Amino acid sequence: MSNTQPAITFEEIRALVRNLPGPDLDAGTAALQRERQLTKPAGALGRLEEIAQWMATWQGQHPAEVRRPRVAVFAGNHGVAARGVSAYPAAVTAQMVQNFQNGGAAVNQLCEVADADLRVYELDLETPTADFTEGPAMGEEDCCQAMAYGMMAVETGVQLLALGEMGIGNSTAAAALCHALFGGEAKDWTGRGTGVDDEGLARKVAAVEAGLAANPQAKDDPFEALRCFGGYELAAIAGAILAARMARVPVLLDGYACTAAAAVLFKADRRALDHCMVAHRSVEPGHDHLLAAIGKEPLLDLGMRLGEGSGAALAINIVKSACACHAGMATFADAGVSTRGV
Ligand SMILES: Cc1cc2ncn([C@H]3O[C@H](COP(=O)(O)O)[C@@H](O)[C@H]3O)c2cc1C
Ligand SMILES: O=C(O)c1cccnc1
């Protein structure tokens, strides 16, 4: 991606993962205690209650605040796209970035509704990664540079970070990444992405199989898997998730490609995604397997398969609603409502 000295190395990233800040149990307990006093039958707000507690636990403050949510969309191009694995040409990545900048994409509208600050980060779109069916997609320096770039999305004041990606061919990269991280068969992780036909799907499965054969070492180490298969935008997402953890910013993950990038950190340490929720279940079939592998239940299931952070942006509304109920509702004592009889 560039010839300059990387801002971070794999060794430093591994050290960060070994020393992740844990949950703020005091803030979480304060949320639990307040939740019990709010004017509703116990548990009646379902997962909204869990979300309010999770937000306090990972922001390290009670009550949690969501006045300044950010949606960060990372864009990168993939060498493997030349193998006919997407229904759309690679030029669409840059064209969609332009569309994001002009306010014309789905994610723009969803950010508007959620009152979220949308930032789009382009990662050298002129220079795709190498075709991973022939060897590693990235060198270690480029992978680290992309992770460091992703870390920049976590700026002071951001209270919730929703992550997304744009990169034609990246559902194939995500499939190879998941296959390396979690095993199984290439076909379990490979879906139609932007809508390839049966022949396109067969080309995708073949590319994933060839990728695993060309990069056998990827199975042994999650960061090596990221370097071998991930695009720059997927590496940036992994970096953003790590930086968010350090800065006590809870994270919403989008669909398949975004969750696949996050799964690299999960494989490095099972607690690494405790500050993340998966916003929605993508139609892409590999997402279901991935959610099972990382033990996460998505917030929404709306038949979406877009990417570009759309599901994550949409779920900001849910998190805001959960926090508004938690902070704003009256307690039984304040409102003079009788507590449970039997
Ligand atoms: C117009 C358009 C807008 C998009 N927004 C997100 N994606 C999504 O599609 C891509 C992944 O699918 P595949 O692996 O099949 O290329 C990613 O860029 C993803 O974010 C889009 C795709 C298109 C065509
Ligand atoms: O789930 C996703 O993120 C996804 C699915 C299809 C195409 N692009 C993204």
Image (cartoon, rainbow, N blue to C red):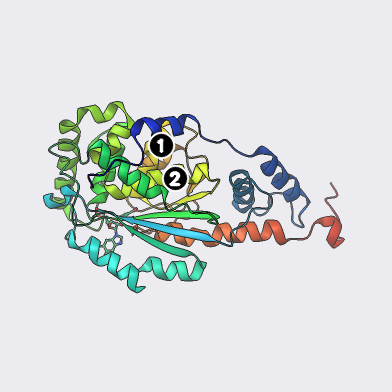
Q: Residue at x 22, y 53 (%)?
A: 77
Question: Marks 2 and 1: CB-CB under 8 Å?
Answer: yes
> Are there few (<14), some (14-19), or many (20+) residues within 10 Å of tag 1?
many
Q: Is residue 179 above or below residue 239?
A: above
Quadrant location of ligand 2? bottom left
What secondary structure is marked by label 2? helix
Could you say which is closer to the camera, residue 55 or residue 154? 154
Residue 276: assigned label:
none
Counting from the top left corner in percent of width and height, residue 158 is at 53, 56
Taking the view exactly as shown, the residue that stands out farthest to the front is 4
Q: Is residue 168 above or below residue 176?
A: below
- State the CA–CA distance, disc 2 to disc 1: 9 Å
Left/right of residue 9 with respect to residue 269 in the rendered view? left
Does the image show residue 188?
Answer: no
Looking at the rendered structure, the kind of residue marked 2 is Ile
What amino acid is at disc 1?
Leu
Circle 2 residues within 10 Å: few <14, some 14–19, many ≥20: many
Q: Badge 1 is on which residue? A: 265
**Horizontal and vertical percent for residue 301?**
45, 55
Q: Of residues 203 and 89, which is closer to you in this image?
A: 89
User: Can you identify the residue that label 2 sits on?
Assistant: 241
Q: Is residue 109 visible?
A: yes
How far across and down, in percent of the image, does residue 26 sit? 70, 40
Q: Which numbered disc, 2 or 1, marks the residue that appears first in the sequence?
A: 2
The quarter holding residue 333 reads bottom right
Instruction: Please name the residue shown 40% across and 69% down the image.
Output: 108
Left or right, residue 312 beside residue 167: right
| Residue visible at 50% across and 52% down in the picture | 299
